[in-house]
Image (cartoon, grey):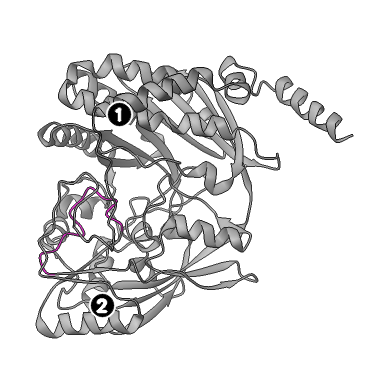
Amino acid sequence: MAQKNKKTDRAERKKGGKNTTLWSKICRKSVLLPSVFGCLAVILWVFCVYDWPQLYRIEDPYKVSYDGRITFNLTHSQLPETEAEIVQIVRDANNQGRKIRVLASGHSWSEIAQTQDIMISLGRYKGKVSFDPATMEYTVKAGTRLAELNELLDKDHVAMINLGSVTGQTIAGAISTATHGTGHGFTNLAALVTKLKFVSGSGEVMTVDNSDERFRALQVSIGMCGVITEVTLKVEPEYRLSEVRSGHTLDECINELDTLSKGERVKYWVDFHNNVCNVFNTSKTTEEPFGFMCSVVSNSIYYAFAVVTRITYLVPSLTTPLMKLVSLTLMTPTHRVAKSYEILTDFFRLPIHQESEVVVELKDTAELIKTIRDVVINGHFPVNYVTEVRFVKGDDAWLSPHYGSDKIFCAVTLTIYAPEKTSSAYFDAVYTNATRKFNGRVHWGKYFTSGPTEIRAMLPRFDDFADVRLKLDPNGVFMNDALKKAFGF
């Protein structure tokens, strides 16, 4: 009977058009072709002596951004293990007129965490605090990385409602910068928070929940209001996801965006040079897990990107043909089923690159993609990585790039590995067009150059945030030069 059911399931999948392509058969029955491709990529990677970026490590506290371009010249670093230690550090800094920034994992391309004075890492302040099955609220210490959080949740048979692709971030860093996944019905991670415990600029321990208006300032605060010590999140029972990838022309994805993007969790991977788009359509399922090897092969594309980005950094003219080779893999359909966090997050660490993000309302998405394509092609920018398009439900956090709970936003992640002059020119060209045409917003953890006037225009509750920040940190203990320049505080 069990054998018959398996045959029936396979027949139904074939009838529904799933896993009937050559690539799907190869993924499930043979790994010859992708293995050859993977081996060649790894050989080239070794040949290029590729340097993978290092996230911040408490045992080796050098201070750099993800791409290694932002360095920290510290006078003092702290690795507290208790809340009492954090309180004492903040009180001492406040009394001595010194400055503090909290460095999470270093998965950032902006200068928001940079400090020339005291750096606090919460790398040793992590772990589960409590879980309330009645309310489905899970509390962890702020230094807990998302990968560790996923493991904790899995042990309690619950899961995050949504996730982004990267799990090296700490939960405090992820919510403080409005990190997000994708889906019209899914907010960023900060909007999943129901309660926060933090240490204010005077060293006072405070707890706020969503009944306190200050909570809207703390949800996405970029560390300007205090040191977050505990985060309480809404979670849900564990679940599995089915991910179907399909290849399209970019014009198809633009013209059919309203239809394609309405899946449960949809994102695009775009190659502007070759005018192609890989669509990820992910949804809940009760199917048993399958396609593990397909997952490994598909995710190994990052090794190919590592090779492409290194070569094209040195020889930009090779960007289009090399990206075309990668796109051949991206365009091949795949299907896999696994636990939610295994589908939503990537197996491999991203190769070194620079990253920025533009956020616009859903109605402006198609025109924004066309605008970015024009910038890339007409500006001859060697964009040697996919451009990711994701969708985010709006929220009420005052500094959230997705502020506006009645709206749906599109977040376009711009990725490139090039000399700083080139990458900055590319990001600035896109921002100039996006801001002028669509009132585009920025991602706080990625490259941005917006100033107080622009940011105030982006965010209706900017002044309300400024008032709360001043009350919680009147002496500016948690400010640095980059934040002063951006926000004018």
Q: Given the image, on which type of amino acid does mark 1 rest?
A: Trp
Element marked by disc 1: helix
Q: Earlier in the sequence, mark 1 or mark 2?
A: 1
Which image quadrant is residue 276 in?
Answer: top left
Residue 282 forms part of the magenta stretch = no
Is 306 left, or right, of 16 in this rendering? left
User: Within 10 Å of the Cα at label 2, are there few (<14), some (14-19), or many (20+) other Cα atoms?
Assistant: many
Location of the N terminus by quadrant is top right
Residue 110 forms part of the magenta stretch = yes
Is 330 left, or right, of 271 in this rendering? right
User: Within 10 Å of the Cα at label 1, are there few (<14), some (14-19), or many (20+) other Cα atoms?
Assistant: many
CA–CA distance between discs 1 and 2? 49 Å
Could you tell me residue 316's position as x and y percent? 18, 21
Is 291 left, or right, of 163 in this rendering? right
Q: Which residues are magenta?
A: 105-117
Of the pair 437 and 348, the residue shown nearer to us? 348
Could you tell me residue 384's position as x and y percent? 27, 26
The residue beneath circle 1 is 45
Answer whether residue 357 is visible to the viewer in this image. Answer: yes
